[in-house]
Image: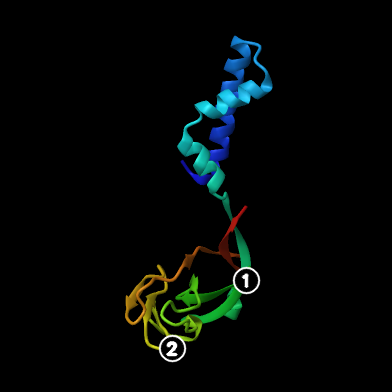
Amino acid sequence: MTTALLPVALWTFVQNMRMSAYGESGRSRRGLESDILSNLPQKLIVETASKEINMSRFIFAAKVTELPDQAATCVEVEGQRIALFNLAGEFYAIDDDCTHEGGPLSDGLILGDEVECPWHGAHFNIKSGKVTLDPATDDVARYNVRVTGDDIEIEIEQYS
């Protein structure tokens, strides 16, 4: 079950318990809530209470005309530094900081669909964020990108 559906499932369960409890007896609200909680699966209670609900939205990052073919730029979106790439008219976004020592990937050399970190030469796949050559061993985050008119937008997850 997805995180966003947990509150709906919990609400539905509680409503069903209320209907059956009030229908069968005239129990007090406090007694009913006690019964509901005792009948909830413990895993559902813990997961619902401990998980944040994540939502995402697309945020403006740059204009198509500002990023020529086979080029990259660093954009800051919602406080995150993101490397934005144009590969043959398709736009891709990954974290700008190399996972090895934080080198700026947007300043790196583009080699096909990979970028080379300018500090120590680690390579990352621009489309997936996967590390393809040492010294980095951890992937970088990849972001969904869409173009609306002349605007390039990056999808950012937000937690509530």
Residue picked out by circle 2: 118
Residue in the foreground of this view, choosing between 103 and 18: 18
The numbered dot on residue 103 is none
Label 2 sits on what residue type?
Pro
Distance from disc 1 to disc 2, alpha carbons, whole Å, reads 23 Å
Q: Secondary structure at mark 2?
A: loop
Residue neighbourhood size for the residue with mark 2, other residues' Cα within 10 Å, grouped as few (<14), some (14–19), many (≥20): some
**Marked residue nearer the N-terminal end (1 or 2):** 1
Label 1 sits on what residue type?
Gly
Q: Secondary structure at mark 1?
A: loop
Figure quadrant of residue 79: bottom right
Q: Could you tell me if residue 114 is visible in this image?
A: yes
Question: Residue visible at 45% across and 79% down?
Answer: 98
Figure quadrant of residue 27: top right
Q: Position of residue 82 (x, y in %)?
A: 54, 74
Residue picked out by circle 1: 79
Question: Is 78 left, or right, of 118 in this rendering?
Answer: right
> Answer yes or no: do the residues labelled 1 and 2 have beta carbons within 8 Å?
no
Residue in the foreground of this view, choosing between 131 and 72: 131
